[in-house]
Image (cartoon, rainbow, N blue to C red):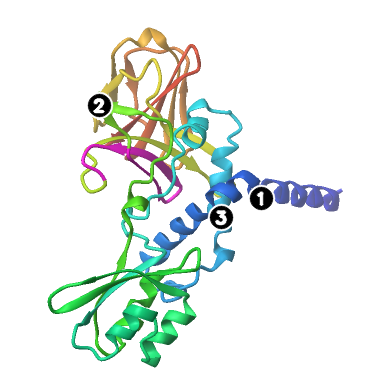
Amino acid sequence: MKKTIFLLLMIITEFQGFSQCTIDPWIQTNYERDAKFLLLRDILENPADPDFDNPFINETRLTPYLEKLSAIYENPTNHPVIDSLFNEFKIHVNPEGGPPITPSKQLEFAVDNTTPWLEDFKNTGVSGVAALDNLMTTYQFSISEYIVLSSFTGFYIETGYDFLNVSALVDDFEAVPDVFYVGTYIPIEARFNYTGIPYELEPGEFVEVCNIVINEDIFTFGIFAGDCPVGCYLSKTWDIQVSENCEVTVLDVLENDIAKLSIYPNPTSDKLYLSGNTSEIELLQIFSIHGKLIQKLNNISEEIDISTLSSGLYFLKLSSKEGKPNNLKFIKK
């Protein structure tokens, strides 16, 4: 009997640990490049990363990014806002939308105009300098443009590979004799990367830029307008949490009828108060920063007792009678 119970416990444990994560074919086709940008961000943020100096993306590391994007895309609640992020807004990662920025195709460098091999390189892409020619050949670079100024010539080169960690090659190009100022470059069309439906964040201010950012287990999808790509003083974002086993929780979506509701004071130590028309609220839920349901209320009043919560950041989810949510953040002191 004890042996049977032990085996049952083992089976239950194995089942609970089973991952729900899979890669959707549509995400594989349309968001693999985004996964590469997200991975490259994580690599460049950590100089100790084993791939920090590797120009080639280790594609075996793309799996968790593709799985979590797939989980959002295939969310079990068929959330209409999530559907719009992929199919209407078509939000993708912006290579300049870090930190850090993630250049993947271009480098720029300068050469003094008195350099003996300059003319040959301008005309043929071959300099006769082994170090430079080897880099150009190995990483399939070609000259996309050059600009001749009074004392030097600036070159823009682009790799034939679909995606490279070109930041890893800066030191190599700086070591080439007669080459100075080596930097990465992101072309303007990659910065203005929004290709979704025309959408105004304010009258006359159409979305020009979009981005996806990961902070721990929260994916933030954003659209931006107004003095982009540098300023972008107008924005709308959606926060979506994806657990390790790819369970999806929409944390912050303000596209609904109860979006005008607010809470105060914030931070607070014991009571939260709702401001606005609370008659539309049918369900109130409090989640931890990790997406765990802490409290659930069906009898809604304007006063919420949070005195028993531990100090920290929480998400307050208000659901209307139509099932539309409003997600608010608060801090328990």
Q: Would you place residue 69 above or below residue 288 in this image?
A: below
| Residue 226 is covered by the magenta coloring | yes
Is label 1 or label 2 in front? 2
Check residue 64 in the rendering and tell me which mark sits there, or answer none: 3
Q: Quadrant of residue 184?
A: bottom left
Q: Would you place residue 278 above or below residue 236 in this image?
A: above
Secondary structure beneath label 3: helix
Q: How far is mark 1 from mark 2, CA to CA?
A: 50 Å
Disc 3 + disc 1, Cβ < 8 Å = no
Amino acid marked by disc 3:
Pro
Amino acid marked by disc 2:
Gly
Q: Is residue 247 visible?
A: no
Q: Earlier in the sequence, mark 1 or mark 2?
A: 1
Q: How far is mark 3 from mark 1, CA to CA?
A: 16 Å
Determine the residue positioned at 39% across, 79% down: 125
| Residue 209 is covered by the magenta coloring | yes
Q: Is residue 223 visible?
A: yes
Q: Which residues are magenta?
A: 208-228
From the viewer's perspective, is 136 left or right of 145? right
Residue, disc 2 = 204
Check residue 17 in the rendering and tell me which mark sits there, or answer none: 1
* Image quarter of the C terminus: top left
Amino acid marked by disc 1:
Gly
Secondary structure beneath label 1: loop
Residue 265: horizontal and vertical position, in percent? 22, 26
Q: Main secondary structure of the magenta part?
A: strand
Q: Earlier in the sequence, mark 3 or mark 1?
A: 1
Secondary structure beneath label 2: loop
